[in-house]
């Protein structure tokens, strides 16, 4: 397994729309393992392939306290969304140190392929529901800061560019 590099906002590659995975083969299973290693190492609860510069519809999620219950979502689709919304704090491994409130459907039903290429469906609420919606946005090239005002977004852009410059200094 290897740890992958996570793209940082405002990298334009984060706005790429992902294509469907054509075959769930060894290449995809290796990518799933590498994404899980990358997500756990970064202390995240989710990661979309877009964030590691792979533009295919693949997500990994683990919202369990024990950090040993990974969900693998290949070519995921939202088949149902609740009418009621929740407003919760979100973070993003591509926008480190920034947290803000985003409106999301309280519950969603997801249909997806698993690591073996089999179709499955599940209902999600709470953090899992929020995380699924956040990661599905990544696959559409959308980062959570795009729900915020342009003033906030511009400030975040400046902060992230400064942070990247500071980290590159010897
Ligand atoms: O996509 C990502 O960058 C991962 C992101 C997922 C996410 C967390 C919380 C709400 C929505 C989406 C993260 O893992 S952020 C870091 C984190 O571990 C975390 C942040 C807030 C609550 C719980 C966990
Ligand atoms: Zn994110």
Image: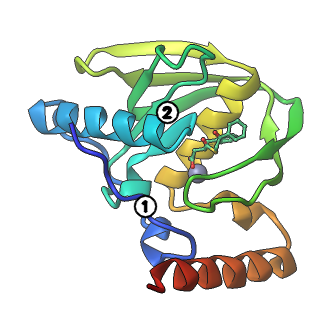
Going by the picture, which residue comes out furthest to the front?
A: 170
Tell me which residue sits at (46%, 15%) in the image. 68
99 vs 73, nearest the viewer? 99
Is the residue marked by circle 2 packed among few (<14), some (14-19), or many (20+) residues within 10 Å?
A: some
- Whether residue 165 is visible to the viewer of this picture, yes or no, is yes
Quarter assignment of residue 16:
bottom left
Image side of residue 130 versus residue 28, left or right: right
Residue of label 1: 17
Report helix, strand or loop for mark 1: loop
Q: CA distance from mark 1 to mark 2?
A: 14 Å
Image side of residue 72 versus residue 88, left or right: left
Q: Is residue 169 above or below residue 90?
A: below
Residue of label 2: 77
Tell me which residue sits at (39%, 43%) in the image. 38
Image side of residue 31 versus residue 93, left or right: left
Q: Which corner quadrant holds the C terminus?
A: bottom left
């Amino acid at each position: 397994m290897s740890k992958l590099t996570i793209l940082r906002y405002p990298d334009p590659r984060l706005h790429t729309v992902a294509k469907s995975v054509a075959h769930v083969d060894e290449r995809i299973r290796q990518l799933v393992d590498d994404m899980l290693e990358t997500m756990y190492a970064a202390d995240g609860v989710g990661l979309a392939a877009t964030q590691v510069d792979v533009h295919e519809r693949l997500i990994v999620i683990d919202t369990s306290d024990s950090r040993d219950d990974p969900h693998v979502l290949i070519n995921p689709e939202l088949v149902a969304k609740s009418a009621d919304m929740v407003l919760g704090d979100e973070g993003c491994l591509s926008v480190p140190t920034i947290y803000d409130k985003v409106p999301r459907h309280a519950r969603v039903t997801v249909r997806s392929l698993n690591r073996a290429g089999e179709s499955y469906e599940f209902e999600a609420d709470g953090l899992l529901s929020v995380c699924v919606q956040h990661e599905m946005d990544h696959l559409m090239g959308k980062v959570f800061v795009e729900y915020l005002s342009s003033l906030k977004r511009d400030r975040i852009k400046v902060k992230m560019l400064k942070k990247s410059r500071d980290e590159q200094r010897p």
